[in-house]
Amino acid sequence: MNLASSYSHIYIEEGVRNLPFSVEILQKFPKAQIVSVEDYKQVFNRGSQSFEQQKRSPKLLLAAKKEQFIYDGSRFVQDADNPNFFYNALSLNCAYDCAYCYLQGMYSSANQVCFVNLDDYFDATNLAIRKRPSKDYPLYLCISYDTDLLAFESVAPYCREWIRFCASKEGELDVEIRTKSANFAQLSKLKPQANVILAWSLSPDSICETYEHKTPTLRSRIKSLTEAVKKGWRVRICIDPILPISGWQEAYSGLVEEVLQSVDASELLDVHLGVFRMNSDFFANIRKRRAPVDLFYRKWERKNGAVTHSDVEREELSQYVAALFSGHVDTDRIRIW
């Protein structure tokens, strides 16, 4: 997927046009129509938008985030057993179009927002490091939580800038960059940082093809993460969500077998497993906004404001996949949501 030629219109807040990150992005789109706006929300939050139509031809919005640069970690995300668990929102929406993604229910717009005032994020992160709840642990920050930054690196090199920022923060800051991309080449010339985790989300081919639209193939992702391991990066495998499709046991057995044939499991940082779970309001919004997808019409349990599996089904799915890694990855390096 070539993002460098995919935006016909770029909306930019008047106050950020001359910021270095904005200039770098705009240089990649010499043919795009540039539209100045006072506030990105005039475009992103306007009424009567068609999410489906925008997803087919999204526009790019460059803006400054004006408040709350760091958020407490969500209960829907694994915290890696770190009490200092936080995330930020550098970009809104994602270049990919996964049918099960909560972002479809979070925003009424499918346009892509890039916040370009990186120095404000770095300042806020430095403050959070100093004020982190437990000084026994570094600040654990997920920076690719509301998007896929590595998929977008050719447009907005957030990963590059954060990796550089992390270079002087070892012991104080751990950053996770989660991705479904096959874009490690964008980072291959950078020095691996001990406090940066590259986390690849993997799914069986059948799920990639059916639900993870616009994403690279499983083989491409595995090749990319294998290259990262060889370069000395800390690499995490994420199989999340595990979906109970027809023949799911065989599908996930094949996935894990392909991973273990491609990379030495002892060189992986860890493995994170999880099942489908989503905020109930986001779930309802997706059913209203998107074309029907079978996942949203199967039998789910609703509890504590979330839509997810029954405890029995969650345990069956998670433990089955965990067992596939048994003997290859130490038990304490397999984390289950």
Image (spheres, helix red, strand yellow):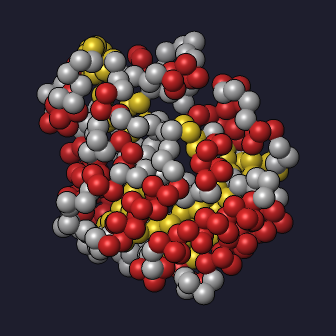
Q: Is residue 253 above or below residue 285?
A: below
- Write the residue at 70% across / 38% down: 283
Q: Residue at x 27, y 14 (%)?
A: 33
Residue closer to the observer: 119 or 276: 276
Q: Position of residue 29 (x, y in %)?
A: 24, 25
The answer to whether residue 102 is left or right of residue 216 is: right
Q: Is residue 294 left or right of residue 61?
A: right
Image height check: is 258 above or below 45? below
Q: Is 222 displayed left or right of 40 in the figure?
A: right
In this rendering, the count of numbered labels is 0
Quadrant in the picture for residue 101: top right
Up the image or down, 272 lies above or below 92; here it is below
On the question of residue 144 being in view, the answer is: no
User: Image point 20% across, 66% down: which residue?
Assistant: 191
- Say which of 297 and 62 sits in front: 297
Q: Is residue 258 visible in the rendered structure shown here? A: yes
Quadrant occupied by the C terminus: bottom right
Residue 240 lies in quadrant: bottom right
Residue 114 on image: x %, y %? 34, 34
Please identify the quarter of the rendering in which residue 7 is found. top left
Note whether 38 is above or below 273 in the view shown. above
Residue 182 at x, y percent in the picture: 40, 52
Front in this rendered view, residue 283 or 184:
184
For the N terminus, the quadrant is top left
Residue at position x 39%, y 45% from top? 151
Q: Estimate the x, y position of residue 65 in percent, counting from the top left.
A: 33, 35
